[in-house]
Image (cartoon, helix red, strand yellow):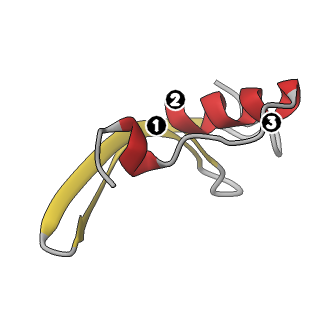
Amino acid sequence: MRCPKCGGLMSFEEFMSVTEGMPWSYEGWRCVYCGEIIDALILYNRLRAKTGEEEGVAAGAKQGKK
């Protein structure tokens, strides 16, 4: 897969973090050259922006969190 931003090589990764004591993770693609990250939520929100819809979906809202 090629990066849409720079044309570089994309690597599939699992991203993990601990926020307020609650661990979370998601899978996506990261460009090894420029660092661009793309996952399903990012693509969904970009598509909504292109079609002119007003609001995207926040990461917590997609998972049923506030």
Which residue is located at x 29 percent, y 39 percent? 64
Percent position (x, y) of residue 60? 37, 49
Type of the residue with mark 1: Gly
> Can residue 41 be seen here?
yes
| Label 2 to label 1: alpha-carbon separation | 7 Å
Q: Nearer the viewer, mark 2 or mark 1?
A: 2
Type of the residue with mark 3: Ala
Which residue is located at x 27 percent, y 48 percent? 25
> Can residue 13 be seen here?
no
Q: What is the crowding at mark 1: few (fewer than 14 residues within 10 Å), some, or many (at least 20)?
A: some
Counting the numbered discs, the total is 3
Foreground of the two, 17 or 11? 17
Q: Contact (CB < 8 A) between labels 3 and 1?
A: no
Which residue is located at x 69 percent, y 42 percent? 55
Res. 28 mark: 1
Foreground of the two, 53 or 37? 53
Label 1 secondary element: strand
Percent position (x, y) of residue 54? 77, 40
Badge 3 or badge 2: first in the primary sequence:
2
* Residue annotated with mark 3: 49
Q: What is the crowding at mark 3: few (fewer than 14 residues within 10 Å), some, or many (at least 20)?
A: few
Q: Contact (CB < 8 A) between labels 2 and 1?
A: yes
Image quadrant where residue 2 sits: top right
